Amino acid sequence: MNGKDIAGIFARVRANRPLVHHITNIVTINDCANITISAGAAPVMTSDKAEAAEMVSAANALVLNIGTLTSFQVESMLEAGKRANELGIPVILDPVGAGATKLRTQTVMELLDRIDIAVIKGNAGEIGTIAGIEGGVRGVDSCGVLSDPEETVRACAESLNTTVVMSGPVDIISDGKKVMLVENGVSMMGNLSGTGCMGASLTGAFAAVEKDYAISSTAAFATFGRAGELAAVKSKGPYSFRTALFDELFSLNEADLAEHAKVRAKDAV
C-alpha cells in the first residue's frame, strides 16, 4: 500500500459522499460532524432508539462512540448495530475510556458480543483493556505503555475477527494478519480534545468506500495525519490548530497526500 492507493481511497470518499451515522458523545459531536464533512462525507448525528434502525438503514457506515455513556445510548447502539449488520453496513466502535470503569469495560464487551464490529479504534489503554491487558486508562486518556503494541493489535484483531486501530504517535492497524503503521501526524493532535473521536468518524467514512477495513483504516489515519501536519504549520496553539485541521482536510490535495503519506507494512503472519 502506497500514497497513491491512499489518495485513491480519499478520492472515492469525496466522489461518493457516504453518509456516516454517528451515535456518539456530546463533548465532540460537533467536531465529529465537521471532520466528516471536511473529508467529503456526510454526517448524521442521532441517537434515539426509536429511529436508530431506520436512520442507519439510509447510511453507509455506523460509528459508535461511548465517550459520554448512558444506558439509553447503549440501547440505541445495539438497535442500530443489529440493523447495520443485517444490511452489511460497516460498524466502527470507539471504546472511549474502556478500562477506566467497570461499566465502560462491560459495555464494550457487550457491544462486541452482540454486534459484528468492522473496526475497533482506540488508544493504547483502551485496546490493551479489550485485549485483556491490565491498566492504562485515566478518565478517557491512555496512560499506559504496552510492551509489544504491534503484536497486541494483531492478536486482538485475530482473536475478535475484526480490524483494530491503535491510535498514537504511530498508528497501528491490523486485521489479524497484515499490520500497517501510519507515521503521519503531529504531537499537537494530542493536545486537542476530540481528535480520537474524529479519527473514528474518518474511519467510518473510509470504510464506507473500501471493504478491506485494514486498508481503509490505514488510509483514513494517513489522511487525517497529513491534514494535521499541514495544520500545525499554520497554527499557534491547539485552538487555531483545531480550525486549521478542518480547513486543511477540506482542501487537502490528493497529489500532496499521495506524495506525503507515511505508511509501511509489517510482514504478514
Image (cartoon, rainbow, N blue to C red):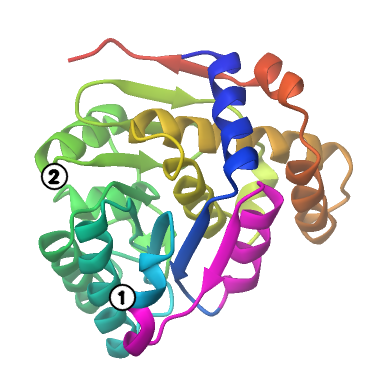
The disc label shown at residue 160, or none: 2
> Quick check: 136 left or right of 43?
left
Q: From the top left corner, tell me how far across and down residue 163 is, in percent.
A: 28, 39
* Dot 2 amino acid type: Leu
Measured in 3D between alpha carbons, the distance from the residue under mark 1 to the one under mark 2, in whole angstroms, is 24 Å
Label 2 sits on a secondary structure element that is helix
User: Going 53% across and 37% down the picture, which residue do you hit?
Assistant: 221
**What is the secondary structure assignment of the residue under circle 1?**
helix
* Contact? badges 1 and 2 (CB < 8 Å): no
Which residue position holds label 1? 53
Q: Quadrant of residue 229?
A: top right
Foreground pick, 116 / 145: 116
In this view, the residue in front, 187 or 91, is 91
Residue 251 appears in the figure: yes
x, y percent for residue 260: 68, 19
Q: Quadrant of residue 112?
A: bottom left
**Badge nearest the viewer, 1 or 2:** 1
Q: Is residue 41 magenta?
A: yes
Residue 162 x, y percent position in the rendering: 21, 41
One can see residue 169 in this view: no
Label 1: few (<14), some (14–19) or many (≥20) C-alpha neighbours in 10 Å: some
Q: Is residue 14 above or below residue 106?
A: above
Seen in the picture, residue 151 relative to 70 is either above or below; the reply is: above
The residue range painted magenta reads 27-53
The mark nearer the N terminus, 1 or 2, is 1
Q: Quadrant of the C terminus?
A: top left
Q: Is residue 128 magenta?
A: no
Quadrant hosting residue 95: bottom left
Is the residue marked by circle 2 packed among few (<14), some (14-19), or many (20+) residues within 10 Å? Answer: some
